[in-house]
Amino acid sequence: MRLIWEEFLNILKQEVGSHVVETWFKAVVLEQWDQKSQTVYLVMPNGFVSNWIQEHYLTLIKTHLSRLLQVETLKVVCAGKNNSTNSSTPLIQPASLYSEQKNVSQTSHHLTQNSKASSSQSTVSLVPLTRRHYKAELLKLNAQYTFNSFVVGPTNELAHAAAIAVSQNLGKVYNPLFIYGGTGLGKTHLLHAIGNEITKKNPQATIFYETSDSFINEFVNAIRLDKTRQFRDKYQKVDLLLLDDIQFFSHKEQTQETFFHIFDSLFGQHKQVVFSSDTLPHHILGLQNRLQSRLQSGLVADVQMPTVEMKMAIVKKKALLHNLTFDDNVARFIAEFPTSSIRELEGHLIRLSAFSSLANEPITVEMAKKVLICTKSSKQRLLSLEEVLKAVSKCCHVSIADLRSKKRTKSIVLGRQIAFYVMKKCTPHSLQIIGQFMGGKDHTTVLHAISKIEHLIQKNREIGITIETIQKTFAH
Ligand code: ADP
Ligand code: MG
């Protein structure tokens, strides 16, 4: 159970950011799993956290835990700390928690919308991933990621305009659309916004939203079960394919081969495909040339770090979404506070809101200063994989390309191992993501490298100094 919970937290970190996980989930324990009744019992540190989690993260908990536990309908019971695990008095009765899944059996395994599913929350966002669904790898669209909630400015206007154009002329302009940029800068938001827009305009359209990670997993399963044909056929009926984080296809030759044919068939039928990636197509290592040229054959648009004005607008939009009120001075303070992504910016807002609820005080600039500055100094800032890679490359005098390559030269291998170590320590990413980012390495390779460095640090002072030097480059 502990491992399942850890894995769940890892997934959650990637979806909502480590600030959220730190703030809300750190003290939560997966106490018990009753397979017979398909119920998990979560022990909450207090009622406030319990209510918050249920209000904001229940769907995510169900989506991912049911997948990890391989059940169709998961019930979640949140109990207070002092209640026994078989809690006769859970803070919330399970019935109220899973009532939203009552339509599970009717839910189609893909995202074809029926006309009944038109109200915002009850549409795709509640499609649960069951084992059957997981095989189809169709993830929900987040109903909150719309064009309306997306702030546009000079750093993302091309990507935004292209996304709008695509959703108005599916398959006719900018096909494929390729959106790239650093983590937490709005790529997934834009992909979902296209999906949500099409859902609204054409409920009959068949939309697949998938992360490349899940595409790969499903493909591997299809090979294992000798069902690659069915796997490919499933894409025949798609009108819009949204494929998130395509950089994970790096060095996955067989996946690329299959995807290439899927893409060509969709493209031939004028079906729209939208990709996101953390880097340009030709910077994705280990990508077949022909696939690379397909990826850049439509429109390639980037998203960059927003300006302070955009950040301020984002803070205001998100505050509205979370029902928070504060004046413009607070919004400005948060917007001007150093951050490396919009996800981090949102994390600050969530921390502030938690603090204000717990202290039962309105959010002021003084409070924001106290909470954010204290967060910053008491905890090391979470870094992006790109930042670490650059710093390691500089300090170890090994090029970025070599670090991500398969070269086995001693100095390159050591640099790469140091990169794995610092990435695990200073970024919120899982071993698997780190491995993929570093040129498609297996997560066991990453794990091995980390323990190697941990071992070396004990014996070799120089390694420790190098790592400290790397970390110092991140201090403001
Ligand atoms: P990425 O996929 O690039 O890593 P996401 O799309 O997941 O990033 O964005 C991270 C968070 O930031 C999400 O909550 C998203 O809603 C928010 N966000 C990103 N860009 C914008 C924007 N321009 N306007 C409003 N919110 C944004
Ligand atoms: Mg994303």
Image (cartoon, rainbow, N blue to C red):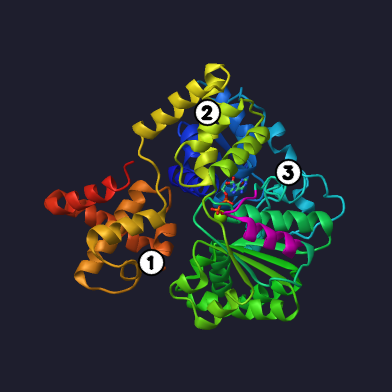
Give the residue furthest to the top: 360
Which dot, 3 or 1, sits closer to the camera? 1
Is 159 contained in the magenta span?
yes
Q: Earlier in the sequence, mark 2 or mark 3?
A: 3
Q: What segment carries the magenta color? A: 152-167
Q: Tell me the kind of residue under disc 1.
A: Lys
Would you say residue 223 is visible in this rendering? Answer: yes
How far separated are the C-alphas under marks 3 and 1? 38 Å
Mark 3, residue position: 101
Q: Residue 131 at what x, y percent from top left?
A: 63, 57
Q: Which residue is mark 2?
A: 352
Q: Residue at 34% of width from left, 41% of height from top? A: 476
- Mark 2 lies on a secondary structure that is helix
Please name the residue shown 67% across and 36% down the image.
Answer: 321
- In the image, residue 21 above or below residue 188: above
> Which amino acid type corresponds to the residue marked 2 in the rendered image?
Leu
